[in-house]
Image (cartoon, helix red, strand yellow):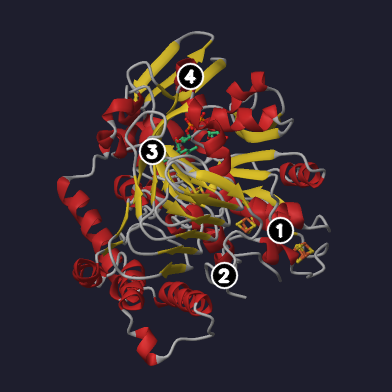
Amino acid sequence: MIQVIEKDKCCGCAACFTSCAHKAISMQLDMEGFEYPEINQEACTDCGLCQATCPVVQYEKRQDLRKTNYNTQVGFAARNKNYDQRLISSSGSIFPPIAEWVLDQGGMVVGVSFDKDFNAVHKIIDKKEDLVELQGSKYLQCKADNETFKIIRKEIQTGRKVLYSGMACQVEGLKSFLRKDYENLYTIDLICMGIPSYIVWQKYLKAFFPNEKIRYVNFKEKSVGWDSFCFRIETDKQTFKERGMQNLYLRSMFLTWNMRPSCFQCPFKNTERISDFTLADAWGVSKQTPQINDNKGLSSVVVHSKKGLELWNTISDRFDSIKVSLDEIAKNNSNLISNKPQSGNRKLFYRMFAQNPEEAFVKLCTEYEPSRIECMIINIKNKVKTLLSLKFWTIDKKKFNELYDYDMKFNASFRGKKTFSKEELSMLQIKYLWYYRKTQAAKDSIWQNYYRNKLIKFSNYTSIQLYENMNIPKGLIIGHPGTIIINENATFDGNIMMTHGVTIGRDVREKRAGSPHFGKNVCIRCNSTVVGGITIGDDVLIAPNTFVNFDVPSHSIIIGNPATIHHRDNATEGHIGKVE
Ligand SMILES: Cc1cc2nc3c(=O)[nH]c(=O)nc-3n(C[C@H](O)[C@H](O)[C@H](O)COP(=O)(O)OP(=O)(O)OC[C@H]3O[C@@H](n4cnc5c(N)ncnc54)[C@H](O)[C@@H]3O)c2cc1C
Ligand code: SF4
Ligand code: SF4
Ligand code: SF4
């Protein structure tokens, strides 16, 4: 008897439901109010497609896709400049401008809206005036449907642009269902602590607003400030407002009692994501960017892919934004990378809820206030969990090998060889690369400080300054040691060559504020400077002693100060390495 996956791991993304051509799968509600696939064994032909499509079953196998996707990661604290639009959104209102750009191209947008009973559902729109329905976080799981993914597939296959927004597990489900990557599909996922059951939500409404017609719900309105989590319901009889933890529904969510079991062991909470954008509240990060925080909504944004970054750069004038590191985002919003522990009271909540929902909310939510000792125990448990995780004790060897092996092939081919001899491996710039990649691979492990200190020492010795947090993807050649300085916010697509005297810097002035982004296959010759929030395209050669502070198209040679652009196909041929 086939089962797609163990129940407690199933995130309810419905990819299996949609993919089964024999209509053998239906989604069934359990007692807690979550939907799970149920297989009609008589209709099932045992073809295995559901398991091949399940993003949880396939998680490890799809890791390479995430790795290639997240090569271009950049983090921002950002807010939509359109104040009215921002007030309607839950955070900094990053979703609407991205959606409008897609709609402007004749595309279609899929996001989460309320249906007439205030259940969350995925809705497809192609008009800007409908966008408002998708704005605002709905803190309950969407009802599973087996149409949305199919419609998306049909539309993207016609070449139309599509934006899909949902939780990380839903984006994974969609991509797994599609089986291949489409250039015209854009995806947004959210940082999430987990997802509550829609039956708990419906029973909450019935218990506390009996005989009232619900007209409007906002889980996070901003009249008393974005950080206050103000919950608002309008019915035919009243307008009801309550702040975050005072509201019993939100409280049951923050205490994790109404959350889907898979959310306590979710594999998708990670910086390595398959989406183009991850959006969240700019918790914590907002303190570092007070100049753009008016307490009416600020977001943390992670752009993962090259395609996402191109879109972001196209509409960047619609945002006030400041680059922040992914580490900063994760440090202040741990739901990006780690799961919440399951509360001991979750079972009790559901037991009481089955008997009397109102009592479960009122009694349990108001009476149960975790004591300081309980909080301490939870914290200690979390710390022990981190300490026990393998990643903490060892450096990420796979990551090191991937980066360093490629670098060596790339460097050797630049010098017209297949591999380096022992003597060549002891060249200072090659040794530097070894320490740099080791430090990157040791991140979050007990070895982090050891390699970081080694790198700093070696930096002083060679005058090469690369920050270990800077995500320079595989393919790095340092031509000669000697002062090389790179601002830590610069970003790279991979395959870059630089040599002594190169400076990559940040500009602080309005128009060009920020640090450069480099496309693939870029060669920067000695004593050149590249500065500001500019984009250097693919296959670009920057000649010695050149000063660049403007965008450079792909396939160019840049010469001099003031610099001039010369178009040339294969501009970097022979100037950088080539890995087959
Ligand atoms: C259940 C849930 C838990 C969350 N947990 C966290 C958290 O722990 N930390 C954090 O920083 N941020 C969390 N968020 C994300 C945050 O609340 C904002 O949704 C996000 O920052 C986007 O804000 P925005 O202003 O750009 O989007 P808005 O303009 O407000 O648009 C909302 C976006 O969220 C999508 N969305 C709304 N409800 C759902 C849903 N039920 N399922 C899937 N997608 C939905 C919509 O399609 C739309 O794209 C959570 C969101 C949800 C729905
Ligand atoms: S094995 Fe094939 S037929 Fe059976 S439920 Fe899965 S997808 Fe459907
Ligand atoms: S995680 Fe998604 S694809 Fe996998 S079993 Fe659950 S609903 Fe089906
Ligand atoms: S934590 Fe979020 S992404 Fe993970 S299973 Fe739950 S809803 Fe999906």
Q: Nearer the viewer, mark 3 or mark 4?
A: 4
User: Crowdedness of circle 3 by 10 Å Cα count: few (<14), some, many (20+)?
Assistant: many
Numbered circle sitting on residue 252:
3
Q: Is 349 placed above or below 482 here?
A: above
In this rendering, is residue 167 above or below 443?
Answer: above
Which image quadrant: the N terminus? bottom right
Q: On the image, numbered disc 1 is attached to which residue?
A: 180
Q: Earlier in the sequence, mark 3 or mark 2?
A: 3
Cα–Cα span, label 1 and label 4: 35 Å
Mark 4, Cα crowd under 10 Å, few <14 / some 14-19 / many 20+, is few
Taking depth in this image into account, of 500 and 354 the one nearest to the observer is 500
First-in-chain label (3 vs 4): 4
Residue holding disc 4: 82
On the image, the x and y values in percent for residue 189 come to 53, 44
Residue that appears at 52% across and 63% down: 67
Task: Write down the quadrant of residue 442 in the picture.
Answer: bottom left
User: What residue is pinned by disc 2?
Assistant: 574
Of the two numbered discs 1 and 4 on the same chain, state the one appearing first in sequence: 4
* Rendered location of residue 362, percent (x, y): 35, 31
Among numbered discs 1 and 2, the one appearing first in the sequence = 1
Label 4 – label 2 distance at C-alpha: 48 Å
